[in-house]
Image (cartoon, rainbow, N blue to C red):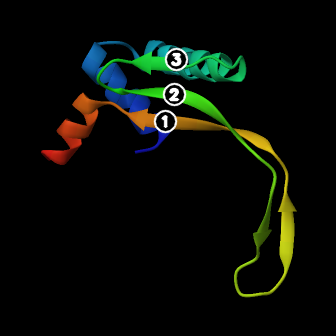
């Protein structure tokens, strides 16, 4: 499912126009992004939580060669699945 299909599904489930659903989805994604950029976490009980983690600098080996590259330190986004979502997917 791509973003356009997701927006169509949200519009159908919520009884919204596609324009309103697109605005709601975009606002949700922007809010999650802004919150993670500021260093805070976003938690949806039962669904999961979005957090950030710091990755330290390291040296990595390029597969298939003996060459190594230095990978700089960075901050990455993480998602941890909540129990309700995990159970729902497992029962499909």
Nearer to the camera, 69 or 8: 69
> Quick check: 37 left or right of 8?
right
Label 3 belongs to which residue?
28
Q: Which residue is mark 1?
A: 79
**Foreground pick, 62 / 92:** 62
Q: Residues within 10 Å of mark 1 (few under 14, many from 20)?
A: few
Q: In this image, 1 relative to 50: left or right?
A: left
Q: Which callout, 2 or 1, points at the residue further toward the start of the chain?
A: 2
Q: Is residue 59 above or below residue 74?
A: below
Q: In which quarter of the view is residue 52 placed?
A: top right
Q: Are marks 3 and 1 in contact (CB under 8 Å)?
A: no
Q: What x and y, as percent, mark residue 49?
A: 45, 26
First in residue order: circle 2 vs circle 3: 3
Which residue in the structure is indicated by mark 2?
Answer: 50
Q: How many callouts does the rendering have?
A: 3
SS for tag 1? Answer: strand
Which residue: 49% across, 36% down? Answer: 79
Q: Is 34 located above or below residue 47 in the figure?
A: above
Q: Residues within 10 Å of mark 2 (few under 14, many from 20)?
A: some
* Side of 92 where 65 appears, left or right: right
Mark carried by residue 24: none
Q: Nearer the viewer, mark 2 or mark 3?
A: 2
Label 2 to label 3, Cα distance in Å? Answer: 13 Å
Helix, strand or loop status at disc 2: strand
Give the mark, 3 or 1, whose residue is nearer the N terminus: 3
Q: Secondary structure at mark 3?
A: helix
Residue, x 22% and y 43% (percent of image)? 89
The image quarter in which residue 34 lies: top right
Of residues 19 and 51, the one drawn nearer to the viewer in this rendering: 51
Between the residue at mark 2 and the residue at mark 1, the CA separation in whole angstroms equals 5 Å
Q: Are marks 2 and 1 in contact (CB under 8 Å)?
A: yes
């Amino acid at each position: 499912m791509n973003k356009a299909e997701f927006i169509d599904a949200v519009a159908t489930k919520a009884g919204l126009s596609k324009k309103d659903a697109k605005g709601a989805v975009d606002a949700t994604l922007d809010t999650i992004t802004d919150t993670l950029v500021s260093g805070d976490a976003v938690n949806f009980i039962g669904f999961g939580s979005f957090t950030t983690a710091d990755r330290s600098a390291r040296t990595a080996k390029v597969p298939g060669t003996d060459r190594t590259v230095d990978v700089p330190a960075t901050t990455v986004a993480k998602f941890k699945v909540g129990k309700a979502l995990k159970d729902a997917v497992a029962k499909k």
